[in-house]
Amino acid sequence: MLELNTPDPKKAKAFYSKLFQWQLEDMPTRLCPMIPYTMINVGEGTGGGIMKQVPAGPSGWLAYVLVDDIHATTQKAKSLGAEVMKDVTEVMGMGSLSFIRDPTGAVLGLWQPKSK
């Protein structure tokens, strides 16, 4: 999954929907109702989302890795020298995420979908 944090979601949505013919769907979020979230449906392949960049947060794309146990994987990353930038957080009843910075400084999202 990929997620774009951008200072101008409207402009980004116009650009990427035309560039890749992505289907975009705006939805409210429970994490921050003042910041709408746009789901990216790419058909086959990896989808994701677009959201307004939070103050002091970086602008850019963030890749997520699907994991079976987000708590264990986040702690394992920490034990291997990663900085946990955002600990495990539930997202809209869809699953849980965390953000880590590896020992080289690269940021990565971890994602575990909600089990059915």
Image (spheres, rainbow, N blue to C red):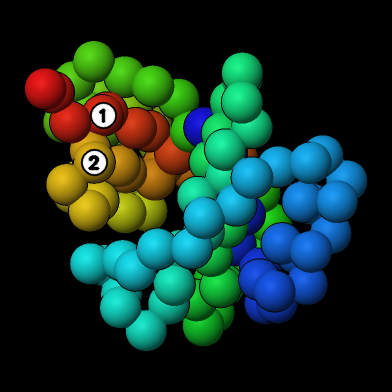
Q: Around disc 2, counting alpha carbons within 10 Å, would you say few (fewer than 14), some (14 to 19), or many (20 or more)?
A: few
The image position of residue 16, as x and y in percent, is 79, 52
Near-viewer residue (46 or 59): 46
Residue 29 shown left or right of residue 41 in the figure: left
Q: Which residue is drawn at the image coordinates 27% and 28% (left, top)?
A: 112
- How much space separates mark 1 and mark 2, taking CA atoms? 6 Å
Residue 29, position in %: x, y? 31, 66
**Image quadrant in which the C terminus is located:** top left
Residue placed farthest to the right in the image? 19
Amino acid beneath label 2? Met
According to the picture, the residue beneath numbered tag 2 turns out to be 94
Residue at (44, 72) in percent of width and height: 36
Evaluate if marks 1 and 2 touch, with contact meaning CB atoms under 8 Å apart: yes
Q: Residue at x 30, y 78 (%)?
A: 33
- At label 1, the amino acid type is Pro
Q: Which type of secondary structure does the marked residue at label 2 adopt?
A: loop
Identify the image quadrant of residue 53.
bottom right
Q: Is residue 7 above or below residue 28?
A: below
Q: Quadrant of residue 99?
A: top left
**On screen, 54 above or below 38?**
below
Looking at the rendered structure, which numbered label has been put on residue 113?
Answer: 1
> Residue 105, can we see it?
no
Circle 1 — which element?
A: strand
Q: Is residue 31 visible?
A: yes
Q: Earlier in the sequence, mark 1 or mark 2?
A: 2
